[in-house]
Amino acid sequence: MNDHIYVDTFSLLLNYHLWYVLTPVRVDFIWRDSRANKLFMVLIDQNREKLLAVVPQQMMRFIYGGNLLGGVFSLNHFQIKPTYAEYPRYCWKNHQREAKLFPLLWCTDVNCVHFISPRWACSMRTVDKGNENCDDSQNPIDIEKENRKRYNRNYYARKKEKNKMRRIANGEGCSQPTTLTSCPTMETNETNINEDSSVSVISDNVILMGGRLFQQFAVDTYIKIETTRLVFVEKNQTKIRADLYQGVVDCFNAGEAQASRVRQRVVLPTSFIGGPRDMRRRFLDAMALVQDDGRPDIFLTMTCNPKWKEIDDELLPGQSAQDRPDLVARVFHAKLEDLKVQLFQRHIIGVVGSYVYVIEFQKHGLPHAHFLLIMTPGYKMNNPDDYDKLVCAEIPDPIRCVAPYNPKLLMMFNCHINVEVCSSIKSVKYLFKYVYKGHDKQVIHIDKDQENVVINEIRKFQDTRYVSPPEALWRVFSFPLSKIHPCVMALQIHLPNQQLVRFKDGDRMEDIVDREKEKNSMLTTFFKKNKEYSNARKYLYKDFPKHFTWNRNNHCWRTREHKSMIGRLVYANPAEGERYYLRLLLCHITGPTCFEDLYTANGVLHPTFRKAALERGLIETDDNLSQCLVEASLFQFPNALRRLFATMLIFCEPGNVRKLWDDHYDSLSEDYRKQYGCAERVKNMVLIDIRVFLESMSRKLSDYDLPNISAHIDLQSRGYREVQEEYSINVEYEDLHARDSLNPDQKFAYDEIMRHEDQNITGVFFIDGPGGTGKTFLYKALLANIRARGLIALATATSGVAANNMPGGRTAHSRFGIPLNLDNNSMCKITKQSGKAQILREAKVIIWDEAAMAKRQAIEAVDRTMQDITDEKLPFGGKIMVMGGDFRQVLPVVRRGTRAQIVDTSLRMSPLWASVKRLRLNINMRAVNDPWFSDFLL
């Protein structure tokens, strides 16, 4: 037993919390592990027929004490559950970690062949061996084809094709045990059903008696299955690539020979159920169904009932429904199938023409299904009498917890079934945008800089999700998550020679071009079909799937013989330009035989699809955009107009951007024309502003028909919005001539600071004076004279009230990005390439009012940040820093701090204070007529 694979794991069981239920056990024998130097006991059942668990002897002695060998004990209160301090991410190639995490469920020989299920076809070692052979260059799906027993899902939930799902007879529920499909790991043994009792004795499967341990095992099982698929997708990112056909031709003409050097890799595809692309596709399919058949008539929600007889009959004494998520999933699936039979085959509430349903799981566990039903014309509900025949509800309902329901369905299924009448298509948006919004997140991590980070859709899908046990087993059993009827086909659209082409690494560009040259796309084949058959010309492109079927192998349309299908043109954003207008034309023109037919309007061949759509009256002209700018110019400042202009470029796609620019250039540049005399400089400043707004929304100025920015003008720093705002601050006449009104103390401080500026000398000053001594008046004089010289002077204050008293004033936290939680090594949240950093580099003087109220850690953080931005080791990066305040007034705020703690956080206690030159203001201008009060303040 010393060589037992789980000895190391059993030695750690003392650190586990107790949570497990077993029948009476007998201690068969005790052995000592020489490596762990601990005793372990083998627990068997009372009849000495079956191994139940292996536990440390110390744990048993702690509970029972005395000599345990050969004794029989009841462990109904003995429970084991591992802690979750650090939960490991499963490796899809190594299943032995599962056995170490669940020693009470996997406590047999080294081959991991479980003693509780003789019907298993393979061991975990077989699965691990197959996965180990699957290296990075091998497809796990190929291994599955070679030996399906080695694939995770087949191992955990192998289905027997002949074991069909049992129908619930006569609509009265399941009268048989709910072993509807064969799952080796999580199944009940039908041969052990006690015919004389209503309780099924599951004596051959410890897993199903695990309670919460079984719930964890179920979630881990699904994670392993999901990871297997995601690993395959991630490892094959470099093998399959996609690009437009024209792009491949361009690369081949440019001399590129290898396909591995072309375009982007394929990410998490729509074939992965539950992924973000799959969610988006299903939502668009549902909207296409509503567009074709009209709004839904009934919104029905069915919720699982944990008290169903089919569930209770399979539970052991002391178990609840949450202990058997496999029963919850199987019984709910069976009930759901019966509900579909009642609705769509027996027409219990009328004939349903189209429907959509989705299975939703919540963190508290129980699944429920959302149905959207679109009735046939003869069964539409048009008046309150029709509503009362189907839905029972009182408005307002005196019993608030009773939802609208259908009595027949309620009695038939004995569960919560909410039946409501729909009045709009908003229910479709709720169904697919809410239910398929993705998994709930537990932890959110925000990266500071995402510019150089590769977006990994697979990792974003996996991380920090909630997965409940019923959802995990629902997916393990391969039950469907949603369905739509009739089916919806996504119809591809593309510009000429820009159809999507798929190829592999190593393919030669010449071979790709030759292979794709003769291959027809769905759209080009639609043109050929219209050219060959006159009957096909009466259909729109989106209606084509109703009458023709698409053959994927031969890339051709054939006449449909059975059933019907709805077509949906793939989504195109107005910002895509010509592709959007092509889609618009295909939605309104029947029977085009080529792209030229779409370019033609009123007998005239136009150069663009937009021109053709405009001539056909499908889009409006830019007059409304021009009128919007005219109206906005009456009450908005030029900076707001430039933002509005950039927004129009992105979201409105004006047809003639240059004309819109020329017509409204005067209003867009009004402020710069007053500030600068050079017309070329004014134009460049306006274009830089628009470029900043466009880049903030991931667009470029070169994407639009606008003038180019002159390269010979040095506008690099002026391109930042923060720098432009500082240069555009108007200097008031009173502030500019305030120097002549300064008192002697103020004039001394003013001359000293300006001397440092004139001689380009660094310095840190503190204007010390009580309230009324004219500190703000001095600040305004300094700001006005420095700004009048064309330099930048920054005005900040600790409080917002003080900041508003200075022109261009901002709070220190806003200007410097001071963090809320400070320590002795804090840095401000400013990147060296940002506009905030640039304005600090160009600033000549920085004024910080009410600095006495700021904590020294905040001022020291600004000092460290300024040194980092300017690459100067001088105080505040060599800038002229003018701080002011009154230590006699409000000191820094320290929550529940003592007097010593408050003093310790003040600027006077900072190492920077030694380099500060103190300038005192003793003349109180506010109380000049009250000398006694002035002396009292001093």
Image (spheres, rainbow, N blue to C red):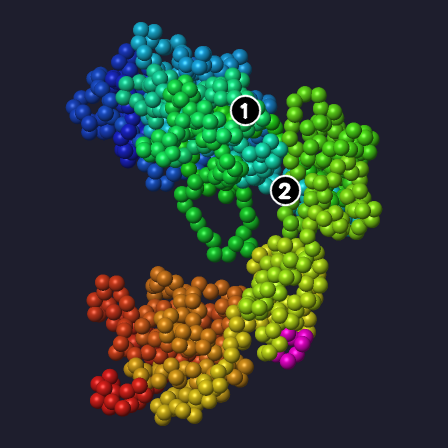
Image point 66% across, 41% down: which residue? 241
> Does 768 appear above or below 601?
below
Name the residue beneath numbered marker 1: 379
Q: Is mark 2 on a helix, strand or loop?
A: loop
Residue 740 x, y percent position in the rendering: 43, 92
Q: Is residue 32 above or below residue 443?
A: above
The residue beneath circle 2 is 571
The amino acid at mark 2 is Tyr
Q: In this view, does 777 lie to the left or right of 141?
A: left
Q: Where is residue 111 in the image (x, y as percent from the top left)?
A: 44, 22
Mark 2 and mark 1 in contact? Answer it, CB < 8 Å: no
Task: Residue at 68% x, 52% y: name it.
Answer: 620
Give left or right: position of 419 versus 292.
Answer: left
| Mark 1 residue crowding within 10 angstroms, few (<14) / some (14–19) / many (20+) | some
Q: Which quadrant of the rendered structure holds the N terminus?
A: top left
Q: Is residue 679 magenta?
A: yes
Front-lying residue, 782 or 568: 568
Helix, strand or loop at mark 1: helix
Magenta stretch? Answer: 676-682
